[in-house]
Amino acid sequence: MDIYSLLRQDHQRVKQLFDRIEATESGGGGKRESLFTEIKKELALHKEAEESTFYAALGILPEMSDRIEEAMEEHVDIEELLQELEELDTGSDAFMAQLAELREEVEHHVGEEENEIFPRARELLTEEQSDKIAQEMLAQKQRLGAS
Ligand SMILES: [Fe+2]
């Protein structure tokens, strides 16, 4: 699988988790808790694996360095929102409001990756390079404990 399909798959998985957690009843209980745990894990793995492979390869290209720096700042913003969410009771309205903010931030980031970064990367990386990056990203996720 090429790196773009692999990353799109990540994006899709997170989107589904957001759909599922938003569909939980208010109060939410254990279901909401476990979905939130999955979202955290998914986003943390994505961040680590993407930064050390795809972003690392693109970030050294002068045409892309600013763009990648910006994307990494968005990863940090997402991480901060996750930390704030951890302080809240998953059953509360405040949690769901904050979660909606996280989703917006994640979707903004995903949109920029898919619509701006991917097309540029396709021009700049050979197929061989992008395949290699995909392999590295899979291996990295495995190492970090993806199930
Ligand atoms: Fe990302």
Image (cartoon, rainbow, N blue to C red):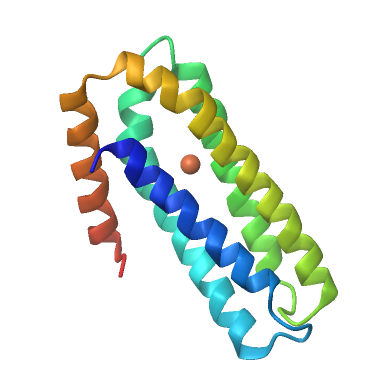
Q: Looking at the picture, how far across and down is residue 23, in whole percent? A: 69, 74
Q: Report whether 42 appears left or right of 28.
A: left
Q: In this view, does 3 lie above or below 40?
A: above
Going by the picture, which residue comes out furthest to the bottom? 29
Residues 21 and 81: in front is 21
In which quadrant will I find the N terminus?
A: top left
Residue depicted at 60% across the width and 85% down the height: 31
Residue depicted at 45% across the width and 18% down the height: 65
Name the image quarter holding residue 32: bottom right
Residues 79 and 19: in front is 19
Counting every numbered tag in the picture gives 0
Residue depicted at 68% across the width and 54% down the height: 102
Q: In this view, does 119 lie above or below 78?
A: above
Going by the picture, which residue comes out furthest to the top? 62
Going by the picture, which residue comes out furthest to the right? 93
Name the image quarter holding residue 129: top left
Q: Looking at the picture, how far across and down is residue 85, in whole percent? A: 69, 66
Name the image quarter holding residue 5: top left
In which quadrant will I find the C terminus?
A: bottom left
Q: Looking at the picture, how far across and down is residue 26, in whole percent? A: 79, 83
Q: Report whether 75 appears left or right of 6.
A: right
Q: Looking at the picture, how far across and down is residue 20, in whole percent? A: 60, 71
